[in-house]
């Protein structure tokens, strides 16, 4: 069969406008890898974990010797990690002390629509005069002119039933037209869902399980984040200038908010829970020793939880918002070795991501069972009651360039897809350039890619699929869970802000 690497090799490298940092950058693999702290609930009574998360500006130490002003959840980047049990409900009360409205979405969550973080469900900051202040008026769209379309609150409580397969979710800003600059400024954090069955597998755990949020950023001379159209204009104009139409890339790779960090490991198996939270950068990750040996990346899970069986990968193609759950065995290399997680798509420093120093031998009771999960949905084409086609392409929007789905930019007032609760559907997607396509609420399986069988990296239950230039793919899903208005969109955050989003109404 066709390997993932062979297919990837035939595709052009990712393009996009890369910002250059104007501040001295640290050498790779000097900064220790931070692991974001786990958030403590304020209350656990009645079988529900209640959390409070305040969004506020903070100075965060990312580069040595200089602070970076950021927008944060609880003062940190990434925000604190939330740890949950499957089926145990969680509420989060978001308070907004930022100078702009926000929207919080739990990516990959099976969440009732009222708590999903629809792009106009604003959490307003104190002193924000009226709901429309600073919102875009886009000619030809109706929703934003209607104040009734906007929910106006200073805090907002979301309820997450978390009745879903255990996996790594992440929460991030989702405000209409302003998601990309808000995430870039720091509004992203991780949320892990666990259950007994997964824990019983014996995968590496505790300090041998590492959540890894990968992002790219660029820094101005004073240590602040560089971003086109960042701040003063943010309230007055949407999106980013045209040359950033492809998406904004930074020249510094951060893992859990640290530049090219290094982590000391025992010579045993580790479980790496990798998330690409970058706005637009794609990665092709491989684990290589300094003498050029490549280590197996044993994939055990995808966006929406465990695979049926492990898949051994050499390269992990990672588009924005995708997650991979992989086990790496550092017993395969001598003590003292360095293993780097490198990005084949990068150039110079953006090839470097994260290094592990194998410090010592240790006992390892972890295992990777040959059967991981038996609950993966087995949807067949014949189950589908409908087949829909969606083209993800550049086009005209308002007076300028935008990114369109089926020829139309996002309009919160327009219904684009109406699906019946419980129906299985096949969606055929086609893209002009790279578009990581994400559906809210549901997981899907990849049926085909480019008219052929899916790649090994398409295994499992996904919520984001990376379409490559000119590529088509078929996905299959069942719209179950909740009724209401959800979304599907490109997860290149700049594309999303420039129109590439549509409503998904489940009735
Ligand atoms: Cu990661 Cu619609 O979001
Ligand atoms: Cu896109």
Image: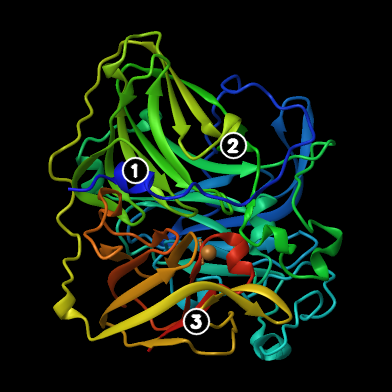
| SS of the residue under disc 2 | strand
| Residue under the image location 39 percent in, 46 percent down | 317
Give the number of the disc on residue 325: 1
Work out whether residue 453 or residue 67 is closer to the camera in this orientation and state it: 453
Vertical placement of 2 versus 479: above or below? above
Marks 3 and 1, how far apart at CA: 29 Å
Residue 246 spot, x, y in % from top left: 61, 59
| Residue under the image location 84 percent in, 64 percent down | 233
Question: Which sits earlier in the primary sequence, circle 3 or circle 1?
Answer: 1
Work out whether residue 444 or residue 173 is closer to the camera in this orientation and state it: 444
**Residue 77 visible in the picture:** no
Residue 333 spot, x, y in % from top left: 31, 15
Residue receiving disc 2 = 254
Residue receiving disc 3 = 503
Marks 2 and 1, how far apart at CA: 19 Å
Marks 2 and 3, how far apart at CA: 32 Å
């Amino acid at each position: 069969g066709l390997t993932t690497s062979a297919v990837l090799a035939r595709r052009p490298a990712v393009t996009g406008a890369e910002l250059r940092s104007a501040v001295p950058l640290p050498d790779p693999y000097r900064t220790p890898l931070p692991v974001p702290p786990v958030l403590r609930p304020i209350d656990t009574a009645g079988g529900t974990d209640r959390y409070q998360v305040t969004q506020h500006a903070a100075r965060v130490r990312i580069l040595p010797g200089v602070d970076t002003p950021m927008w944060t959840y609880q003062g940190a980047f990434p925000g604190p990690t939330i740890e949950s049990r499957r089926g145990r409900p969680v509420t989060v009360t978001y308070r907004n002390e930022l100078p702009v409205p926000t929207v919080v979405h739990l990516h990959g969550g099976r969440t009732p629509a009222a708590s999903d973080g629809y792009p106009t469900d604003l959490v307003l900051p104190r002193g924000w005069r009226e709901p429309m202040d600073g919102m875009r008026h886009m000619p030809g769209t109706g929703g934003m002119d209607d104040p009734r379309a906007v929910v106006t609150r200073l805090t907002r409580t979301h309820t997450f039933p978390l009745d879903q397969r255990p996996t790594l979710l992440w929460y991030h800003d989702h405000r209409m037209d302003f998601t990309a600059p808000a995430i870039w400024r720091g509004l992203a954090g991780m949320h892990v869902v666990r259950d007994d069955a997964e824990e019983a597998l014996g995968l590496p755990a505790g300090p041998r399980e590492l959540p890894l949020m990968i992002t790219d950023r660029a820094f101005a001379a004073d240590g602040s984040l560089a971003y086109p159209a960042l701040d003063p204009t943010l309230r007055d104009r949407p999106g980013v200038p045209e040359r950033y139409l492809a998406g904004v890339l930074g020249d510094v790779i951060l893992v859990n908010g640290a530049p090219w960090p290094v982590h000391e490991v025992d010579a045993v198996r580790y479980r790496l829970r990798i998330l690409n939270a970058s706005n637009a950068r794609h990665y092709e990750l491989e684990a290589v020793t300094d003498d050029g040996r490549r280590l197996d990346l044993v994939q055990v899970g995808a966006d929406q939880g465990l695979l049926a069986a492990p898949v051994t990968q050499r390269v992990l193609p990672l588009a924005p918002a995708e997650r991979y759950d992989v086990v790496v065995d550092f017993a395969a290399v001598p003590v003292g070795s360095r293993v780097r997680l490198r990005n084949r798509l990068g150039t110079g420093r953006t090839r470097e991501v994260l290094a592990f120093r194998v410090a010592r031998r240790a006992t390892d009771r972890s295992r990777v069972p040959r059967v991981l999960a038996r609950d993966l949905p087995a949807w067949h084409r014949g189950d589908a009651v409908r087949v829909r086609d969606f083209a993800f392409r550049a086009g005209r929007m308002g007076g300028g360039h935008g990114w369109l789905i089926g020829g139309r930019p996002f309009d919160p007032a327009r219904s684009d897809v109406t699906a019946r609760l419980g129906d299985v559907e096949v969606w055929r997607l086609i893209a002009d350039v790279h578009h990581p396509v994400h559906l809210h609420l549901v997981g899907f399986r990849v049926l085909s890619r480019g008219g052929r069988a899916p790649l090994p990296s398409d295994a499992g239950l996904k919520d984001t699929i990376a379409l490559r230039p000119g590529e088509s793919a078929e996905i299959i899903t069942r719209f179950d869970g909740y009724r209401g208005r959800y979304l599907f969109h490109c997860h290149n955050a700049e594309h999303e802000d420039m129109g590439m989003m549509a409503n998904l109404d489940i009735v």
